[in-house]
Image (cartoon, coloured by chain):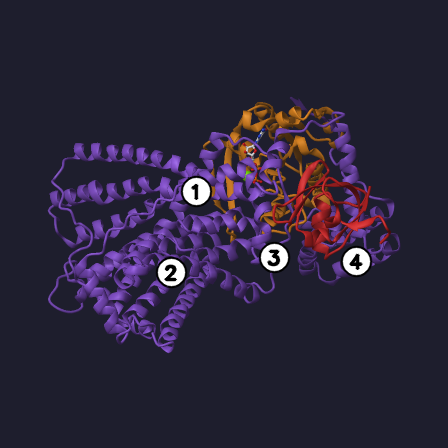
Chain colours: A purple, B orange, C red
Amino acid sequence: MTAVTLASPGAAVRYAPPIETELERLVAALGAIPALAERYPLRWLAVQLLEGDEHLLAEAEGLGGPAVTAALAASRERLAPHYGEDLDVALVDQRYRFVHTLARQALTRPAAPPLTLSDRIDRVVTHRWLGIPIFLALMWVVFKLTTDVAAPFVDWVDATLSGPVSGWATALLGAAGLGGSWLESLLVDGVIAGVGGVLVFVPVLLALYFALALLEDSGYMARAAFVMDRLMHALGLHGKSFLPMVVGFGCSVPAIYATRTLDSRRDRILTGLLVPFMSCSARLPVYVLIAAIFFPAQAGLVIFGLYLTGIVVAIVIGMLLRRTLFRNQPPAPFVLELPPYRLPTPRGVWRQMWERTAAFLRKATTIILATSIVVWLLLALPVRGGGRFADTPVEQSAFAALSGAVAPVFAPLGFGGWETSGALLTGFVAKEVVVSTLGQTYAVAELEEAAEAAPTNFGEDLLGIAGGLVSATGDALQVLPGVIGITLETPEEETALEGLAAAVRAGFEASSGGHGALAALAFLVFVLLYTPCMTAVAAARHEFGSRWMWVSIVGQFVVAWLAALLVFQGGRLLGW
Amino acid sequence: MREVTIALAGNPNVGKSTVFNALTGMHQHVGNWPGKTVERKEGRLILGDRQITVVDLPGTYSLAARSLEEQIARDFIVRERPDAVVNVLDAANLERNLYLTAQLLEAEARLVLALNMADVAAARGLRLNPEALAAALGAPVVVMSASKGQGLAELKATLRDLVTASGRGVRPSLKEVAQ
Amino acid sequence: MSVSEVTLDQLARNQNAVVRRIGGDREFRRRLLAMGLVPGEQVILTAVAPLGDPIEVTVKGYRLSLRKEEARLVVVERA
Ligand SMILES: Nc1nc2c(ncn2[C@@H]2O[C@H](COP(=O)(O)OP(=O)(O)OP(=O)(O)O)[C@@H](O)[C@H]2O)c(=O)[nH]1
Ligand SMILES: [Mg+2]
């Protein structure tokens, strides 16, 4: 139904006579300044200035100079006897009166407003006792969605790229007579690996954005903030900061993107800076390996302690940041509408999932691909020995040289060997590769089963990919009941290879002057706290801009270094 | 042919993006506002012989900008001066929603009111009188339930009238207004 | 402050009141005013968060939540 009218436009708010008089005067004064007249609707500007919009006043003074200040002060003065300090209240009040009249004309209310379904849902969801359990249960579901449910698809993407796709690339280059060349290595180990590093996040992000779209469109997100704000506000954050933190235990990348749900930029950035301290799941294999080597009896305790350390560090750093970088930015007031519950539409949800994931692909691909290629190049360049380009042992590559060059930085922390600093370097790209890098640098048998698979043809490959997707879906579906049923299955970790264990132990003992276990603990703390991965860096740049990206990288490095120093040197002092 | 720009403005969570998606379909482009890290959603809509750029503005309760998003919405409306502003409102929460409308009128925006969430309003027993609202405001009013696709055709028809009617697609220049 | 005047955070659940004044800095006041908390307006405290803060009020037919520290700046008169 459309109602069109030809009545003259400009049915605007009329204020009380004294205000209208001043508005006229102000409009005349402001209109005399061309820079302002060209830029703003003048009556609107006059109203905003009278209402006390300081931002706009600064802009107007910048364009119009002292004439603006003088005219405004004069008008204010003349209005003071009428309204005193409450001119802003009077303006809003009169505007709302106008609105009230409009609404009365446009709407007839029922005598007794029915208790809506939305009201009834709210009684449960924000209930004194049930509110928090319901909230925690939903957070658990989100966490599981972004981890376990997404995991089979992540594996499938990974397997497809490192299997058939790499195979095709190799075959194509082979057919072109470039088999075994550096080009093949660049394509497979640099480009495809880099693209893979981006693509494996797609299932995770789709899962995250699915959850976020449901929570936001349904109206629950505002309730979640309502329920959690007390706790988060005590930490200087906002009720809505809780969700990114939870997601952060799965992966920092979706967690950084999840800060979008926060309304104020200060809260978004502050939360985004703290989220990486939540121990993401990619760090777990490193903990498991090192803890199994050095603390076999208390591995569980050590790992739990690391998770806890991450939370404590986030709290402490949060307090520090509020007193330093964010000193002049008080927390945004919590003035939040709790919209009625709505049923999200599948189309709307899908659109958000797709749009936001596509934005990630556009923004993150370049930086990640570039990093991947740089790492490949470092590994390919021989600097010692007789290796050829793209065919050189790790310890003779530029990578080893670089690792050796930065190693002294880690010497005070007890792990100044080039092998560990090499692992930390690749860990900057992705934590998933720390363990395999340790395997390479300590020159033990390849940790990854470099399975020389039986040659397959294109058709078989396609079948395999499709089959993989089907079984990934099956796996994800199998996880779903667990999501609802809250079962915490402990991941069965493969026992570390004997040879690697011995080499790592010897390496840490040597670099720490005989305090291997302490150095290992410091190493774990460092892994927990420094940059989670290149993708998280790209996400931070995407969301907060380059400046904050650097704050994040440097800040995390400093925090990690200091904390590891505290562990190692503190431990030494205590005589461990 | 002059480029015509229409902005979608309204309180948070009233269905602006739903209307935006329905208007522009697949012809969308997501970028960032210049120098800002806030998403800028822009789409294309063909009405008659006009190609229209539709901009989905961040939700805002008033034109007194506090957050970055609100500032973007305000600056776009008062500075970029789109040819028309589709003010999307939650019909079930009309009074608070109309507060922004009052400010948009003050900012001399050429308004089209989309009374969205008509289904919710009906479920609450609210009876809407769009003619009275249109008469009072001197602006077209369309009743719609965007998530159900209701009222879209009317909104498009209204926009087409607005941009194709001779001389009405072009708003008076600011100089004229100032005089 | 007259006898029946209290601040918004002191209302009991489901208690009605009328807004009288809003304190705090200008920016904050403008924000609440824009959200419909204008002097003379009816408010009802409809809910309190499980941890005791923030609170939820109904004003102009919709639900708005505020922290108690912010609600303390709103003076209301019990109905
Ligand atoms: N019942 C009903 N729901 C609607 C209608 N229009 C939109 N919705 C739903 O309202 C929710 C919010 O819609 P959006 O289009 O995201 O609102 P928005 O104004 O863009 O929100 P922000 O961008 O956050 O300010 C979604 O769950 C929509 O499906 C409608 O007419 N009726
Ligand atoms: Mg939107």
Amino acid type shown at disc 4:
Ala
The location of residue A543, given as percent across then percent down, is: 47, 52
Q: Label 4 marks which chain's residue?
A: A
Of A310 and C28, nearer the camera is A310
Question: In terms of secondary structure, where does tag 4 sit?
Answer: helix
Question: In terms of secondary structure, where does tag 2 sit?
Answer: helix
Circles 4, 2 touching at the beta carbon (< 8 Å): no
Q: Which residue lies furthest to the right in this view?
A: A81
Q: What residue would you read off at disc 3?
A: A331
Which mark is on residue A528? 2
Label 1 CB-ligand 1 distance < 8 A = no
Q: What residue would you read off at disc 4?
A: A71
Q: Nearer the viewer, mark 3 or mark 4?
A: 3
Q: Nearer the viewer, mark 1 or mark 2?
A: 2
Marks 4 and 2 share the same chain? yes
The location of residue B3, given as percent across then percent down, is: 54, 37
- Counting residues from the start of the chain, the first of labels 3 and 1 encountered is 1
